[in-house]
Image (cartoon, grey):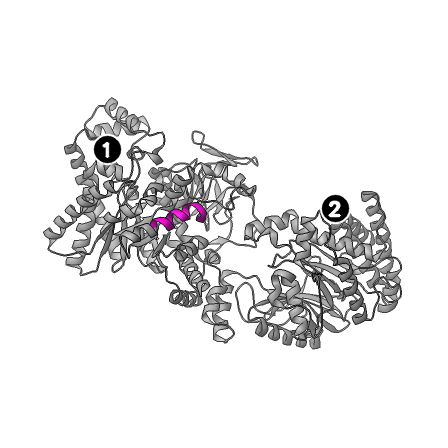
Amino acid sequence: MAKYVYLFTKGQADGDRSQRELLGGKGANLAEMAAIGLPVPSGFTLTTEVCKSFYQHDRHYPEGVESQVNNALKKLEQEMAKGFGDPVNPLLLSVRSGAPTSMPGMMDTVLNLGLNDQTVQGLINLSGSPRFAYDSYRRFIQMYANVVKGVDGDIFETLLEDKKRAKGIENDNELSAEDLQQLITEFKDSYRQVLNLDFPTDPQQQLWEAISAVFGSWMNQRAVTYRSLNNIPSHWGTAVNVQAMVFGNMGNDCATGVAFTRDPSTGENYFYGEFLVNAQGEDVVAGIRTPQPINKAKYKPGDLPALEDVLPGCYAQLLDHRNTLEKHFRDMQDIEFTIESGKLYMLQTRTGKRTAQAAIRIAVEMVGEKLISKKEAVLRVLPEQLEQLLHPSIDPSVVKNIIAKGLPASPGACSGKVVFNADEAEQQNKLKEKVILVRIETSPEDIHGMNAAQGILTSRGGMTSHAAVVARGMGKSCVAGCGDLHIDYEKQVMVTKSGHTIKRGDIITLDGAAGEVILGDVAKVQPAVSGDFGTLMSWADTFRTLNVRANADTPHDAKIAREFGAEGIGLCRTEHMFFDVKRIQAVREMIVSADLQGRERALSKIMPMQKSDFIGLFREMRGVPVTIRLLDPPLHEFLPQNNDDIADLAALAGMRFSEVKEHVEELHEFNPMLGHRGCRLGLTYPEVYDMQVRAIMEAACELVKNEHYKIVPEIMIPLVADVNELKVLREKAIQVAEQVMATYGVKVDYQIGTMIELPRAALLADLIAEQADFFSFGTNDLTQTTYGLSRDDAGRFLPYYIENGLFLSDPFIKLDRAGVGQLVKMGTEKGRQTRPGLKVGICGEHGGEPSSVEFCHQIGLDYVSCSPYRVPIARLAAAHAALKDE
């Protein structure tokens, strides 16, 4: 018969910490603590296999479970020299959950199980304290009713508060034994009224109903939500731990507490924790009474007495156990303890949750203490945790008035006055005003306002929408796809579903990490990157094999990228340079020109500007590659849409209003994602790409000749579907490049490659590689074209897909390995068949997402590229991927 129940007691245990998936984290660690001799109350664990069977068989247990529990209970009675249900010498139990990974507070617990009107008298005789016994009984009724039967806990809390009010007292521990007896009667009456049942008196019934309730809590809504947010598989199940009760509420020589072996907020190496005298565990976290510090390490005048003073002997033992646990588990531990009549018991240990700052400090210091290796230190810090360090965040102590929620498109928190157009954002910025740019959706024409704003809020668009991508690149907070908003440009207001009307000039706060829109200016915590951060990242760099570049369009972005450790630019989007207010008119003049001569005249105005841009980028990135994508968007995106701007353009170009209006309408595309863009523009308007290549090469040649920098330009031709497109454009680019180098009399080691963003290009990668020095997979567009989804519109229905399990994750956030990933893998392999050693990377937003970075490592890419502020995340993710291979 399968073994479903594992015993543990001081000095011995059936299981150990290697069996987390079977015993759950709590059960495995209880077994481990018991085995190394720590004072753990004896008990037993029902495995996660029981939970799986419980759900597979309509909440029935597998054969053998009941007999194994009964046998374990008998051994527990022998060990504790007490009887379960014995009215003279009662054994009371706790029933707790314990998933394979920590899910604090998500599932249920029942304490003091086994009490009834007879056993409570035995508890009075054993303890000599009627008040303690009745307090334990009323707690049990309240917890059992709520956890096992689903009775609203407020019913009992109201009765408790009424009793305290009637007695003129504030704290629970001021109630007398008689008061508690009366409450027990009232609790039972309420239980009967709600459920039409008497409170169960049979301890065996109590036990099995409690076990079933704890298994049942695996699927409660908060547990389901927590698993979804933390990518915890639902098929794991939870274990259930049944343990002999020890009591921290028997008197003033009793206590209960929670502690961390190091400070979980800062990582400082001191024993950090809180406790309460004469209390049970839930009192410490419930906020009913003000907890006391366990020691005087951070003592301030006026603080309540520390455990170190109140029960010094127990504190000394606890400190010793703290050192034992840290050395044994080799990580910061979160521990729970109870002191019963002066005797210390250890109830739990688990790896402690911590902030990113603390995680880095603890990892680095534990290497110095020779507890862990550098490899282990790197693996201890999750790449996604670094988001906390790289952007300001909302002060966790403040109260927030959240008025709307959208997608957490770009992390960080910011506050400012609401403005509804990009021009005003720029004007207000010049006046030193902080503003939030609010748009239905942004377009490239909003770039100047986005740059001027503190943050961006849109009611449409997804995680890879224009607003999201640009904001991440700029390091600005962004909440996108906020469907809770109705934005009225004409009235200059936005109205939320919650009924708030926000006018132009009102102040709001964006939390880009949580996707929240908050009323007013909310206090923030600024990022603090310590020296430990640099140390950890230097270790990570020694382990990773995947290079990390940045997506950067300006020298400012490039500078930030280098500071964060970028090894080049993987994507410079030249169209972003075109939208500058000083050059957009020249771009428009070029587009509406009726002939080549007119277009070249307009391009001659743009050329020096582009060249200046590239000089700035190359200076910041000297010595490392800079991949510059030639013009990609459809031309209509650059053109004005309102009549006043069309009239201005007509005057500039020397054309009639009607001619320009007609041209604007002709260029409009119903589906520009699939239209006249990318290399198609370069083929039909070759003078545009010629100008850009000339600007790139002149910038490079000037820096090589005059400043003696090593410049590594990589010219990238976008949206290629057929090798013939690339062949023609490559030949043209080489011709221009060679002319420029001959003029300057210098040699620049340039490359010409392509952006693979269409499935056909991936399928024909072996042919395309004949004309490409490198491939860069544009995974944003490759995801769109593979799925047939628009990233700007998918936010309307993708949440439904994810919530209902149709998609495991948003493919615009996490690279779809099964579909898009296979195209990347196949394209890489086919490309390298033709051109061994072909350099391959990705430059979509997936380049900064840890699981996507891991996939890129696994299939042998050379680099990933991401927004500057995600470079450290990608570096750490690449190190994790390499270490997991070992």
Residue 359 lies left or right of residue 550; in this view the side is right
Query: Camera-side residue: 810 or 659?
Result: 810
Query: Rounded to the nearest whole Å, what is the CA distance between mark 2 and mark 1?
Result: 68 Å
Q: Which residues are magenta?
A: 812-827
The amino acid pointed to by label 2 is: Asp
Quarter of the image with the C terminus is bottom left
Question: Who comes first in sequence, dot 2 or dot 1?
Answer: 2
Q: Residue at x 54, y 52 (%)?
A: 231
Residue 510 lies left or right of residue 743; in this view the side is right
- Residue 826 magenta-drawn? yes
Is residue 601 positioned above or below 733 on the image? Answer: above
Query: Camera-side residue: 630 or 440?
Result: 630
Which residue position holds label 1?
A: 591
Please give the label number shown on residue 764: none
The image quadrant that residue 329 belongs to is bottom right
Is residue 293 positioned above or below 592 on the image? Answer: below
Residue 167 lies left or right of residue 447; in this view the side is right
Residue 818: tell me if it is visible: yes
Number of other residues with Cα within 10 Å of mark 1, as a class: few under 14, some 14 to 19, many 20 or more: many
Residue 385 position, x and y percent, is 49, 58
Residue 690 lies left or right of residue 799; in this view the side is left
Is residue 146 positioned above or below 587 on the image? Answer: below
Farthest-out residue, top? 658
Q: Secondary structure at mark 1?
A: helix
Is residue 174 positioned above or below 223 on the image? Answer: below
Q: Secondary structure at mark 2?
A: loop
Which residue position holds label 2?
A: 152
Residue 437 position, x and y percent, is 42, 41
The image quadrant that residue 98 belongs to is bottom right
Residue 813: tell me if it is visible: no
